[in-house]
């Protein structure tokens, strides 16, 4: 309590005035010689006590009136503790810009309301206050690099913000806010959290971290006031109406132009009503493909399957949208990016060429890789094969191929080996398969080279039964060394992208195949400069069947047995076609980073430098190979002039990314993917690369924490829960400046005056 | 008559001259006047004959009737009598109260003037008037006389009285009742401040002696509306040790209530004993008040 006009408080001694008047009146009495004493005396004796009390009350009120008047004039101000006045404030605003904030309440979107609340609070800050804003959606992101004192800029920037980012990372945001606050110098420190209080966001803030955070913020040298501002209080009886496209499932295997592929969309309802007809449509690059009607029960899910194809190679965007009218429109559609491959050129180097059909080493493989072409079906194959003898393995042939298969190749010339090594290290993919004709010694020395070469492992001893049907006569030296037995592929869950396809038993059972002969492959521990070797599949004998190792920017797969029917009955099995397709296609596209990423994850596009691309185009046009080896070109030429890549984010804002050299590729990367949606990179050659940034669909559940739960969170954080920013501002103004009490005192004064009149008349027995 | 103007102004006399006081009841009297006496005596108005009984005055025998009937009859006449009025004037301390609205008259002064008016009136109509002044005890007793010279005597006595000591009305009334032998009209001029029950017993004593009683209760306006505002010390006129310093504004309501109770009690008592109670307020001229009362009285008759 303090007084604005303390001098006027001296006026309180005016309480003496009524007292003096009273005493004066009593002393200035007049004497009346009274006759009717017998009447008066009984009245006095009956009322003496009451008269005294009445007089005392009246005197008290009369003394109070000037006292209260003096207090009123002195303008008392109610203050709790020390007044901070207009001391600068360090304010950190945590603004939830997840896409659930786009939900429309009667007053507008939750986000607009939150931004307006934040702006109101910021505009009321004293001069010299510092403000930092952290956007919590997706990944905690500061809006400014350093806290700003220019409040107008802060509010302007805040009003430019758009919601639609991924789920909030509250623990991370709060940590970041605590770091920021610790660096801010102001004495008064406040943390304002503006959120819609979705359980998914806040439940990640468990009791332990919350208590630690509270400890950190409240018990530091400068304690922080934490304010939680919830938007519209949720109505618990009404479940918010919302439908979301929860996920999109694209084909696992690479898809080429002209190929049909399926897109599976999963819809989830957070609505309290059943929807009989929901129109779900698929668009490809904005062009409608098909529309499907489905029903969606309250709280249930529905799956919709689309078929789709495109004749254009390159990056495409698939968007599935559900036509419903609900609170949150942002999650009614979901996009995914797919890269349709042009024909993948596969160079099959046949080490055992035979002119008879299906007797050559690569005949089965070529059929398996291009089944439609062989079957004369008017469908497009992903792969395009070219079979060459080992002698025709030239550098030009290598440059035009995406995948090279060395099938039962005995040996290569040193020049060929050198070309091949450079091509693989520059990003090529190589599959090496065994066979009766290969020269293990040459392979060991040249291709394995103690782990520094291309092969993941040297070819070991031959194992299995001597059941070779065609090659046994021609090569008697290749007799079985171990016992006459066969092996089968161990049926287990595989993490390898090529073999993961067979985790689904419907796609074929690998263990049914009989492997009769194979080379024992041993994995040697890699040295510090060598990449680790991974086993993609093993045999039940314990020997690895498929080994994989990265080599430079490329990758090498090593198959312990032959790809034709000589050493196994793999080609006779129904899964041979998908297996080989998977192996080769995975090799072909493995170098491309994923196009569908989570919010906050890096989106990376790899592309060839323009010169290499031109060279590729030249070789593809069957032109003579260029003189300069283009594989090594970018490192030499592009370091001083790396091409730029434009990035367009989901809001249509453009930015430019600088590329960096990665092997024989250039890579453009961005991590500014907090906002879910489709990002478009335009590569230097004009090709687009789409990235679909996905976020968790938990934000779509618009059920909010009820006030009790909010209160419990506020208690955990030691925070104050605000329901309206106006309440807070009023309380804050009082806290800073105190509350003037004179209107109340004046009301009290008027009351006392009325009371005095009423009591006086009542005591005097005047009735009107 | 030299002292008479002190208590009876010329205006008072002229205002009362046309009025005739008629007693409500027949009282004993021997002076002829407007009052009929129950005693049969010598008069012009014949009343009845009755048989002679030994002991009757021989002068009252109707000898003419004896000649006609040869029997002895007594001839009786209606007699007109005078009223024997005794005025009781209170000289107690409480009668000394002198308010601001009564033109400087104390209640006692007012009582004296009213008594003078009444005396003059009664003597004018040949009634006899007596006077008793009293406070704690009877101060002076002047028996009733009808002679005109008696007025001067009464006036002198009234003018000489000053209010003083404490009263105990009931005791004094008992004494007075014992002193007044013959029944007549008793007029009491007093404020009647005292215990009502005791007072009523004393007044009943008068009635028992078959007196007609008229009470002129003298009030000062201040006593009726208690107009005091500022702090006041009320000192008793009868007992100088009784003093009360009070804020009269706070007491007014209770006082007026008490006054009302007292007056009602008194009125009830008087009505029960068939006593006329006439309040007189000192801010009215005494003659006016009396004239008004007499007019009422005549209508009743």
Image: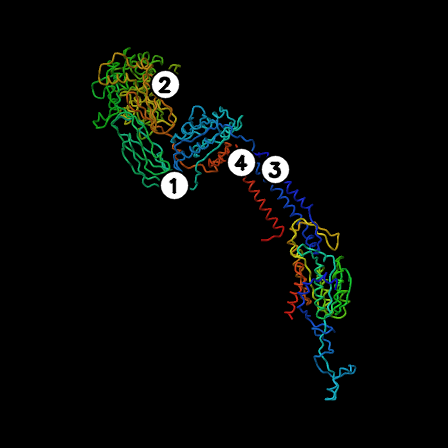
The residue singled out by tag 3 in the image is A11
- Using the rendered image, report if marks 1 and 2 lie on a common chain: yes
Q: Is residue A363 above or below residue A286?
A: above
Tell me the distance, in whole angstroms, between the alpha carbons under discs 3 and 1: 68 Å
* Label 1 CA crowd tier, 10 Å (few <14, some 14–19, many 20+): some
How packed mark 2 is, by other alpha carbons closer than 10 Å (few <14, some 14-19, many 20 or more), is many
Q: What SS does tag 2 mark?
A: strand
Residue closer to the observer: A616 or B229: B229
- Sooner in the amino-acid sequence: mark 3 or mark 4: 3
| Mark closest to the chain's N terminus, 1 or 2 | 1
The residue identified by callout 2 is: A533
Q: Verify CB contact (< 8 Å) between mark 3 and mark 1.
A: no
Q: Determine the CA span between mark 1 and mark 4.
A: 47 Å
For marks 1 and 4 on the same chain, the one whose residue lies earlier in the sequence: 1
Q: Which residue is mark 4?
A: A739
Q: Is residue A504 left or right of residue B74?
A: left
Q: Nearer the viewer, residue A576 or A568?
A: A576
Q: Quadrant of residue A247?
A: top left
Camera-side mark, 1 or 4: 4
- Mark 2 vs mark 3, foreground winner is 3
Q: Nearer the viewer, mark 3 or mark 4?
A: 3
Q: Chain of mark 2?
A: A
User: Which percent across, then down, holds residue A498?
Assistant: 32, 24
**Dot 1 corresponds to which residue?**
A272
**Discs 1 and 4 share one subunit:** yes
Counting from the top left corner in percent of width and height, residue A145 is at: 43, 23
Q: Secondary structure at mark 4?
A: strand
Secondary-structure class at tag 3: helix
The residue most toward the right is B55
Q: Nearer the viewer, mark 2 or mark 4?
A: 4
- Which subunit holds the residue at mark 3? A
- Using the image, determine if residue A225 lies above or below residue B98: above
């Amino acid at each position: 309590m303090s007084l604005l006009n303390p001098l006027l408080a001296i006026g309180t001694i005016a309480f003496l005035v009524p007292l003096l008047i009273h005493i004066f009146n009593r002393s200035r009495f007049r004497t009346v010689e009274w006759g009717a004493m017998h009447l008066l005396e009984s009245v006095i004796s009956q009322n003496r006590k009451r008269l005294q009390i009445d007089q005392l009350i009246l005197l008290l009120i009369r003394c109070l009136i000037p006292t209260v008047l003096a207090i009123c004039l002195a303008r008392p101000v109610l203050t709790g503790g020390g007044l901070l006045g207009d001391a600068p404030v360090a304010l950190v605003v945590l603004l939830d810009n997840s896409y659930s904030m786009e939900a429309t309440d009667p007053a507008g979107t939750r986000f607009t309301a939150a931004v307006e609340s934040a702006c109101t609070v910021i505009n009321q800050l004293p001069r010299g206050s510092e403000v930092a804003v952290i956007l919590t959606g997706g990944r905690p992101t500061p809006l400014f690099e350093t806290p700003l004192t220019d409040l107008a800029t802060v509010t302007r920037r805040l009003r430019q913000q758009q919601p639609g980012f991924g789920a909030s990372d509250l623990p991370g945001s709060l940590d970041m806010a605590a770091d920021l606050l610790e660096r801010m110098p102001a004495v008064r420190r406040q943390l304002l959290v503006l959120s819609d209080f979705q359980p998914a966001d806040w439940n990640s803030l468990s009791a332990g971290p919350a208590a630690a955070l509270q400890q950190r913020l409240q018990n530091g040298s400068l304690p922080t006031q934490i304010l939680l501002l919830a938007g519209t209080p949720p109505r618990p009886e009404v479940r918010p109406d919302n439908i979301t496209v929860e996920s999109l499932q694209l084909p696992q295997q690479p898809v080429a132009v002209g190929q049909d592929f399926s897109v599976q969309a999963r819809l989830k309802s957070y609505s309290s009503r059943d929807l009989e007809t929901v129109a779900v449509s698929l668009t490809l690059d904005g062009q409608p493909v098909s529309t499907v009607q489905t029903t969606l029960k309250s709280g249930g899910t529905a799956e919709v399957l689309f078929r789709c194809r495109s004749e254009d190679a390159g990056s495409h965007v698939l968007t599935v949208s559900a036509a419903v009218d609900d609170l949150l429109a942002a999650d009614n559609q979901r996009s995914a990016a797919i890269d349709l491959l042009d024909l993948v050129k596969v160079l099959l180097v046949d080490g055992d060429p035979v002119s008879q059909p299906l007797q050559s080493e690569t005949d089965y493989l070529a059929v398996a890789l291009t089944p439609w072409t062989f079957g004369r079906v008017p469908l497009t194959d992903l792969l395009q094969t070219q079979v060459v003898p080992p002698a025709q393995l030239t550098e030009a042939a290598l440059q035009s191929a995406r995948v090279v298969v060395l099938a039962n190749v005995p040996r290569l010339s040193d020049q060929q080996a050198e070309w091949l090594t450079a091509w693989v290290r520059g990003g090529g993919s190589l599959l090496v398969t065994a066979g009766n004709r290969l020269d293990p010694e040459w392979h060991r020395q040249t291709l394995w080279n103690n782990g520094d070469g291309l092969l993941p492992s040297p070819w070991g001893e031959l194992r299995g039964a001597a059941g070779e049907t065609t090659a046994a006569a021609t090569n008697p030296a290749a007799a079985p060394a171990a016992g006459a037995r066969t092996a089968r592929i161990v049926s287990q869950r595989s993490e390898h992208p090529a073999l993961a396809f067979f985790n689904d038993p419907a796609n074929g059972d690998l263990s049914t195949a009989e492997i009769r002969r194979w080379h024992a492959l041993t994995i040697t521990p890699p040295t510090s400069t060598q990449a680790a070797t991974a086993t993609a599949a093993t045999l039940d004998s314990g020997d690895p069947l498929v080994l994989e190792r990265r080599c430079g920017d490329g990758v090498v797969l090593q198959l312990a047995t032959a790809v034709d029917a000589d050493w196994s009955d793999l080609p006779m099995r129904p899964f041979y076609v998908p297996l080989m397709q998977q192996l080769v296609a995975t090799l072909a596209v493995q170098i491309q980073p994923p196009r569908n990423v989570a919010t906050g994850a890096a989106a990376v596009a790899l592309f060839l430098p323009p010169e290499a691309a031109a060279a590729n185009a030249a070789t593809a046009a069957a032109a003579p190979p260029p003189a300069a080896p283009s594989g090594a070109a970018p490192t030499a030429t592009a370091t001083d002039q790396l091409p730029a890549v434009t990035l367009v984010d989901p809001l249509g804002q453009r930015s430019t990314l600088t590329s960096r050299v990665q092997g024989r590729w250039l890579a453009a990367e961005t991590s500014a993917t907090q906002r879910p949606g489709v990002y478009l990179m335009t590569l230097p050659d004009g090709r687009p690369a789409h990235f679909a940034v996905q976020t968790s669909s938990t934000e779509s559940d618009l059920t909010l924490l009820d006030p009790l739960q909010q209160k419990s969170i506020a208690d955990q954080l030691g925070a104050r829960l605000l329901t309206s920013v106006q309440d807070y501002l009023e309380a804050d103004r009082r806290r800073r400046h105190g509350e003037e009490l004179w209107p109340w005192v004046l009301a009290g004064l008027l009351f006392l005056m009325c009371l005095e009149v009423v009591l006086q008349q009542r005591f005097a027995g005047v009735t009107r | 008559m030299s002292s008479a103007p002190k208590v009876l102004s010329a205006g008072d006399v002229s205002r009362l001259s046309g009025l005739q006081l008629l007693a409500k009841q027949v009282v004993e009297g021997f002076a002829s006047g407007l009052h009929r006496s129950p005693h049969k005596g010598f008069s012009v108005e014949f009343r009845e004959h009755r048989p002679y009984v030994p002991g009757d005055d021989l002068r009252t025998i109707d000898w003419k009737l004896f000649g006609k009937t040869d029997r002895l009859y007594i001839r009786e006449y209606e007699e007109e009598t005078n009223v024997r009025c005794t005025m009781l004037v209170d000289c107690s301390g409480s009668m000394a109260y002198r308010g601001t609205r009564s033109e400087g008259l104390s209640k006692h002064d007012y009582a004296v003037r009213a008594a003078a008016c009444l005396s003059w009136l009664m003597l004018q109509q040949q009634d006899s008037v007596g006077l008793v002044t009293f406070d704690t005890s009877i101060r002076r007793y002047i028996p009733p006389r009808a002679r005109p010279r008696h007025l001067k005597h009464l006036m002198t006595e009234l003018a000489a009285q000053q209010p003083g000591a404490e009263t105990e009305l009931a005791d004094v009334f008992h004494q007075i009742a014992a002193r007044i032998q013959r029944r007549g009209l008793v007029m009491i001029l007093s404020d009647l401040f005292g215990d009502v029950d005791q007072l009523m017993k004393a007044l009943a004593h008068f009635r028992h002696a078959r007196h007609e009683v008229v009470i002129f209760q003298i009030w000062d306006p201040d006593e009726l509306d208690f107009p005091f505002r500022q702090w006041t010390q009320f000192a008793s006129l009868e007992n100088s040790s009784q003093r009360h310093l009070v804020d009269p504004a706070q007491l007014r309501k209770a006082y007026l209530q008490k006054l009302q109770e007292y007056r009602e009690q008194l009125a009830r008592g008087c009505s029960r004993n068939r006593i006329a109670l006439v309040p007189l307020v000192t801010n009215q001229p005494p003659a006016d008040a009396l004239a008004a009362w007499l007019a009422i009285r005549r209508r009743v008759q």
